[in-house]
Image (cartoon, helix red, strand yellow):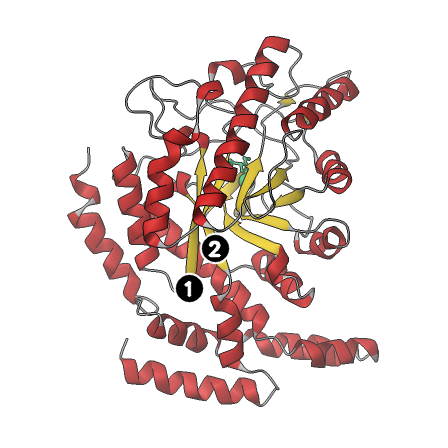
Amino acid sequence: MKKEKVLQAYQDAREQYAALGVDTDEALRRLDSISISLHCWQTDDVGGFETPDATLSGGGIQATGNYPGKANSVSQLRQDMEKVMSLLPGSQRVSLHAMYGEFGGTKIDRDSITTDHFQGWIDWAKNLGTGLDFNPTFFSHPLAEDGFTLSGRNEKNRRFWIEHAKRCRRIAAEMGRQLGTPCVNNLWIPDGSKDTPVDRYALRALLKESLDEIFSEEFPAEYLRDALESKLFGIGSESMVVGSAEFYMGYAIKNNKLITLDNGHYHPTEQIGDKISSLLLYVDELMLHLTRGVRWDSDHVVIFNDEIQLIAQEIVRCKALERVHVGLDYFDASINRIGAYVVGTRAAQLAFLHALLEPTETLRKYEEEGRYFERLALMEVMKTKPLGAVYDYWCLTGNVPVAEDYIVEIQKYEKEVLSERT
Ligand code: RNT
Ligand code: ZN
């Protein structure tokens, strides 16, 4: 895109928004403050670097497709993430899963991992000037094969997973300490049952007991934030998931934890954006796993759809940008994986920009006065304002490819780097 054209379009857009009382420069300043946590697992289809290879299994999550070029090593993963970040305006951080440690070719089981296995990641992040988030890995492991981890009745297995979770918190806190930005440690377990269980209470009581033990160790909030992620159902856990929305909501409110909202984890007619204002009244902070649910799958690439727009709008309208950690969670193995990141992150950024460019005060006034036609009309009008011109300008000033220009960059990377991989 020609620089002058982008600047010209921005000037015009700025005037159009200003006429409605919206300051585009201010919106971009606020957008700059949103750091998006990029989930490392889109690079390799949730594979990880354990020895022997922990191929994605259990947990009812599935990556489909076999597009060439997936990352096979820590260095390839880093190279890919760096490429992704070079194509994105604004700031990002990286979210790691415990299975992505540097294990030096030896078998280190999940109950034995330490910060040493992640020091290389911390150094890498420090070098890039970015932060890290973390996730214990409760799937793709023989001790998760029966479908239960922290809520399992097999006491030996449950202890193994408690130990894993405790170690992950220590690693995450160390990441936060060294990097000077709190690390969100997000806990998601696959536990659930395919068919109707009889004693749900016992399973949930066990999960509660496990969490109490895991969280008994205290860490400063500047280093570590603990988040809990629920799910409605998964493949193989259709009838009941132990860590349900109610379970974690109760736990988080009572124990001062964060709630992770993964918008692929609810009934398709539920509006995840609608949950934000309620949760913010009872928990200090939220974590987002932005994704796109499609029928049975919760993990398609994020696009600029109504659902993502409402989530961003609700956060902005609640004046809660500082209380929400924005992260992504999807894995599509059927398209260029670097492209998947850039499409999804840009869509999430667009949603926040769209929300920041809303004449919220005018809309609020209409609402208070019961002028619902005016509220509806203005919201519709805002949909076709030149949002893209403002986003393009942000890319230009951030020295990253504007609009469709990033497509060629990814094609080039595919040709030069990804296609060379075996
Ligand atoms: C699974 C959860 C979870 C995972 C990642 C890999 O349904 O969304 O967040 O996707 O931990
Ligand atoms: Zn998730």
Q: Quadrant of the C terminus?
A: top left
> Which secondary structure, mark 1?
loop
Characterize the local packing of mark 1: few (<14), some (14-19) or many (20 or more) Cα atoms within 10 angstroms: many
In the image, what residue occupies the spot 67% across and 66% down?
319
**Is 295 displayed left or right of 211 in the figure?**
left
Q: Position of residue 419 (x, y in %)?
A: 18, 42
Q: Which residue is mark 2?
A: 36
Q: Is mark 1 within 8 Å of ligand 2?
A: no
Label 2 – label 1 distance at C-alpha: 8 Å
Q: Position of residue 186 (x, y in %)?
A: 56, 38
Q: Which residue is mark 1?
A: 90
**Closer to the camera, 393 or 91?**
91
Q: Is residue 13 above or below residue 242?
A: below
Do the CB atoms of the residues marked 2 and 1 lie less than 8 Å apart? yes
Q: Which mark is residue 41?
A: none
Q: Position of residue 64 (x, y in %)?
A: 40, 34
